[in-house]
Image (tube, helix red, strand yellow):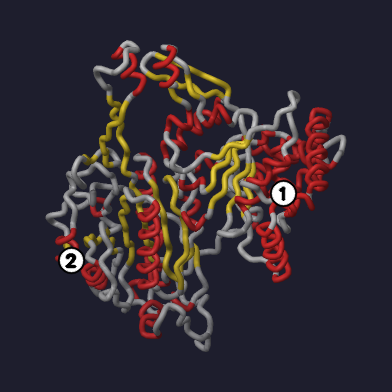
């Protein structure tokens, strides 16, 4: 298959530079390219292979593609059965990791890579050695390569452990100018008509690019780094709140490679500044102006309310519903003020003690939920519930054990099967009400405490979590779907409350996400938690039920309106009211507690 010339790609200069820097110094750790469909991610990644200069032995570095459906044996290598049967020798057949040694391992849609292959990649990336052990037979080989991955963030996030292994990360813009669109289509049309003739037009540019790469590789060892460079990088990494020292090391290597690419003798400030966004894009935990962005004080009265002439916010769909959120009862807002009319306000997490989920027999479960509820002990034939995952036992031929059992004789008299357990992943989707009515009695902070507890327990069970906030007239992602982080407090603290309650929009978005996730991962189990005070007049009765959903009612008024129970019945969800003044009424999300939603 003829690849599009690297030099012919229109625009994308930052991405081109990042890929070339990794070719100059593979120890940078590779490049993750994140962007929407059709943004030339795969085209540029594959085109890099043609401009990689030859090594000292006159050989081109390998460029190996890892398919999403690859087996474990194809990735790490396996026993060469043909060799064993013909010559009775235990010979290993190289896998993709061995073939990529000294070159590039490319993974398209890397965020969709199965966990099993991700775990293997992490082990090899950390050690640089691939070790294969089968029934007393062991084989190891060096496996050092640059990892290039492309992904569409709309199709899911990348596991944090693998994300950090990428040295650089570039996020491609989804828009481009009219002139760029025209030029790209024209170039592609010319290439499709006659690929060889088109490549010949760029042969000189490709050769010059290859020569410049080779010169930069040779000059890399002579590039000097003054002491101020290390201090500058360390200060910026500290300001960005990065974890560990991998960012510091990668930043220094990338700046050196950029200096070599320019033909400079030492690292300059321009080299540091150029690679900064690529090094920190996937590692930054603190915004550059976080130190000066103080949290605004919580509002407790009407003195900060805008004048009555301020037009109401009707973006959440209906003035009646808006009035309900903008003017809650006196017991909620201290007797004055209109929360819905105020600008978004921050409210920090208020941690709460946790206790087991309510028993299903004592929960108020609607008939729609009960009719479709799944047994907590089993989720299907051959599946039993474990800690956070349902275990599915499968079997396949174990070639190593079979050869040993038959002592090399053919035909085989007995077969040995390998049993493996494939875990059914669980994702927790939290819909957090951040509307104006939740600011009274610090309900938003209390609700954030529930979410914090859920995230902590999902982290312990190595499960996934996603948090959507609905308020301020819209639905926003507070925490995108990923393996639950160890600490989510700072992320939750940054979520602000105010405005109306777009409940319908939140439910529709949740259904869209669940459908998308399950289409990509058929075995995925999604548990949904709707945390709200129920202060909305929107109806969701015409929407399909939310499977495996629990509505946590945070309404604390003395005279309760009972809207949470109504919403739970409409969604076919289990209903659980909480009392923040009574720790025993605050549920946990432990996957192995009795009476949970497993």
> For residue 72, what is the image quadrant?
top left
Q: How many marks?
A: 2
Percent x, y for residue 384?
21, 40
Identify the image quadrant of residue 244: top right
Between 1 and 364, the one nearer to me in the picture: 1
User: Circle 2 sits on which residue?
Assistant: 368
Measure the alpha-carbon separation of dots 1 and 2.
Answer: 57 Å
Q: Return the disc, 1 or 2, that comes first in the chain's sequence.
A: 1
Query: What's the mark number on residue 229?
Result: none
Q: Which quadrant would residue 210 be assigned to in this image?
A: top right
Residue at 73% x, 69% y is 179
Q: At 18% from the left edge and 57% from the top edge, which residue is drawn?
A: 373
Q: Position of residue 234 (x, y in %)?
A: 70, 38
In this rendering, the answer to whether 94 lies above or below 423 is: above
Task: Confirm whether residue 560 shows in the render.
Answer: no
Secondary structure found at label 2: helix
What residue is shown at x 52% (from left), y 39% (from top)?
Answer: 66
- Quick check: 137 above or below 461? above
Residue 502 spot, x, y in % from top left: 40, 73
Left or right relative to 24: residue 500: left
Mark 1 falls on what kind of element? helix
Mark 1 Cα shell of 10 Å, populated few (<14), some (14-19), many (≥20): many
Mark 2 crowdedness (10 Å alpha carbons): few <14, some 14-19, many ≥20? some
- In the picture provided, is 267 more to the left or to the right than 276? right
Furthest-left residue in view?
A: 361
Seen from this angle, which residue lies furthest bottom? Answer: 309
Position of 342 compared to 207: left or right? Answer: left
Q: Do labels 1 and 2 touch, CB within 8 Å?
A: no
Whole-percent x, y for residue 470 in the image: 42, 67
Choose between 195 and 352: the one closer to the eye.
195
226 or 331, which lies in front? 226
Q: Which mark is residue 6?
A: 1
């Amino acid at each position: 298959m003829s690849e599009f010339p690297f030099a012919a790609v229109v625009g994308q200069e930052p991405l081109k530079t990042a890929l070339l820097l990794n070719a100059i110094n593979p120890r940078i750790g590779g490049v993750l390219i994140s962007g929407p469909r059709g943004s030339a991610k795969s085209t540029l990644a594959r085109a890099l292979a043609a401009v990689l200069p030859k090594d000292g032995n006159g050989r081109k570095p390998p460029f190996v593609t890892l398919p999403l459906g690859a087996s474990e044996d194809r990735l790490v290598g396996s026993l060469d059965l043909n060799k064993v049967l013909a010559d009775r020798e235990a010979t290993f057949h190289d896998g993709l990791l061995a073939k990529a040694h000294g070159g590039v391992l490319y993974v398209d849609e890397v965020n969709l890579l199965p966990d099993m292959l991700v775990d293997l990649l992490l082990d090899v990336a950390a050690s640089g050695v691939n070790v294969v052990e089968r029934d007393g037979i062991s084989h190891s080989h060096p496996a050092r390569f640059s990892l290039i991955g492309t992904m569409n963030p709309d199709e899911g996030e990348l596991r944090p452990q693998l994300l950090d292994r990428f040295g650089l990360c570039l996020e491609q813009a989804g828009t481009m100018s009219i002139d760029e669109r025209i030029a790209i289509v024209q170039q592609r049309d010319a290439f499709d008509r006659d690929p060889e003739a088109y490549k010949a037009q760029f042969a000189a540019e490709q050769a010059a690019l290859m020569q410049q790469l080779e010169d930069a590789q040779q000059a890399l060892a002579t590039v000097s780094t003054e002491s101020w460079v290390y201090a500058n990088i360390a200060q910026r990494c500290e300001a960005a709140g990065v974890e560990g020292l991998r960012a510091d090391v990668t930043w220094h290597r990338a700046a050196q490679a950029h200096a070599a690419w320019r033909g400079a003798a030492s690292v300059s400030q321009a080299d540091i500044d150029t690679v900064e966004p690529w090094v920190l894009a996937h590692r930054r935990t603190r915004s550059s102006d976080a130190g000066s962005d103080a949290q605004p004080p919580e509002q407790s009265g009407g003195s900060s309310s805008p004048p009555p002439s301020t037009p109401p916010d009707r973006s959440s769909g209906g003035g009646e519903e808006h009035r309900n959120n903008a003017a809650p009862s006196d017991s909620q807002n201290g007797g004055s003020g209109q929360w819905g009319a105020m600008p978004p306000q921050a409210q920090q997490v208020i941690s709460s003690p946790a206790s087991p989920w309510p028993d299903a027999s004592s929960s108020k479960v609607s008939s729609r939920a009960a009719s479709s509820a799944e047994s907590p002990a089993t989720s299907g034939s051959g599946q039993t519930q474990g800690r956070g995952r349902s275990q599915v036992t499968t079997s396949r031929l174990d070639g190593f054990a079979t050869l040993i059992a038959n002592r090399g004789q053919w035909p085989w008299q007995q077969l040995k099967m390998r049993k493996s357990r494939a875990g059914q992943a669980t994702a927790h989707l939290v819909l957090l009400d951040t509307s104006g009515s939740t600011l009274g009695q610090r309900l938003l902070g209390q609700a954030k405490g529930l979410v914090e507890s859920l995230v902590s327990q999902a982290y312990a069970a190595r499960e996934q979590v996603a948090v959507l906030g609905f308020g301020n007239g819209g639905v926003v992602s507070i925490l995108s779907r990923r393996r639950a982080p160890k600490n989510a407090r700072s992320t939750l603290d940054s979520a602000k409350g105010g405005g109306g309650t777009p409940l319908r929009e939140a439910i529709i978005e949740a259904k869209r996400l669940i459908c998308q996730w399950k289409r990509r991962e058929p075995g995925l189990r999604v548990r949904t938690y709707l945390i709200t005070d129920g202060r909305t007049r929107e109806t969701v009765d015409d929407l399909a039920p939310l499977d495996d959903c629990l509505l946590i009612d945070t309404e604390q008024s003395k005279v309760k309106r009972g809207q949470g129970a109504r919403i739970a019945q409409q969604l076919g969800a289990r209903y659980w009211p909480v009392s923040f003044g009574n720790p025993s009424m605050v549920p946990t999300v432990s996957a192995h507690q009795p009476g949970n939603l497993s």
